[in-house]
Image (spheres, rainbow, N blue to C red):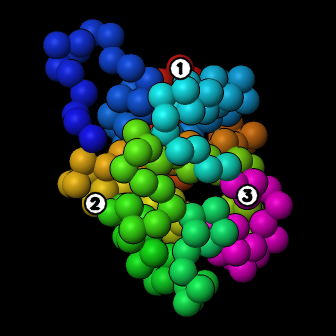
Amino acid sequence: MATWDQADELNHPLDFLLIQNGFISLFGQRTILDEAISWLGQRSYKVIYLDAALWQSSRDMHRDMAEALDFPEYYGRNLHALNDCLNDVATQSYGWTDADTGLVIVVDGYDKFAKRDTRTAHLLLDIFAKQAAYAALFGNRMMCLVHSDDRQIEVPPVGGTSVTWNHRE
């Protein structure tokens, strides 16, 4: 995937705006999230939706991640295995292809899962951010759109970068 055009510096497209400050973007307003998902989908990003509000435990998160990204059968369903498999996703071994403009993981209801399992919720985003940075080294675009009903939520830095609200909120 080619980089963005610097000549368009004053009018960057949405995907640039979402990634420019890190690979994880927070969303509070559902309409803004839905608009972003629609815009990215129209530009051939593979969008994967995960409903974290339904996750009662890390087991549920691992199950849904494995299914959504076509992890291999031997996936160990732990955070180390998640990191390993997302490393393979970053290089398009599975989960998406080079026909896709990029990969977008939408984590809806993040705040609800974070209340149940703060550590795993944070590490999920941290691992994803690190692997998205790795993907960028190969020209692959990965981003995570995180929806929270809790506007006061504070997510510690992930992948060495602060987690910020999207450019419209």
Residue 4 image position (x, y, % from top left): 24, 27
Q: What residue range appears in magenta? A: 50-65
Label number found at residue 134: 2
Q: Which residue is outermost to the left?
A: 7
Secondary structure beneath disc 3?
helix
**Residue position for label 1:** 168
In the rendered image, which residue does mark 3 sit on?
52
Q: Please give the name of the residue rendered at 44% of the width and 23% of the height, measured from the top-left corner.
A: 14
Q: Quadrant of the C terminus?
A: top right
Amino acid type shown at disc 2? Tyr
At x 47%, y 48%, the residue is: 103
Q: Quadrant of residue 50?
A: bottom right
Kind of residue at disc 1:
Arg
* Residue 131 in view here: no
| Total numbered labels | 3
Residue 140 coordinates in the image, percent (x, y)? 31, 49
Q: Earlier in the sequence, mark 1 or mark 3?
A: 3
C-alpha span from label 1 to label 3:
23 Å
x%, y% of residue 35? 63, 23
- Outermost residue on the front side: it is 99
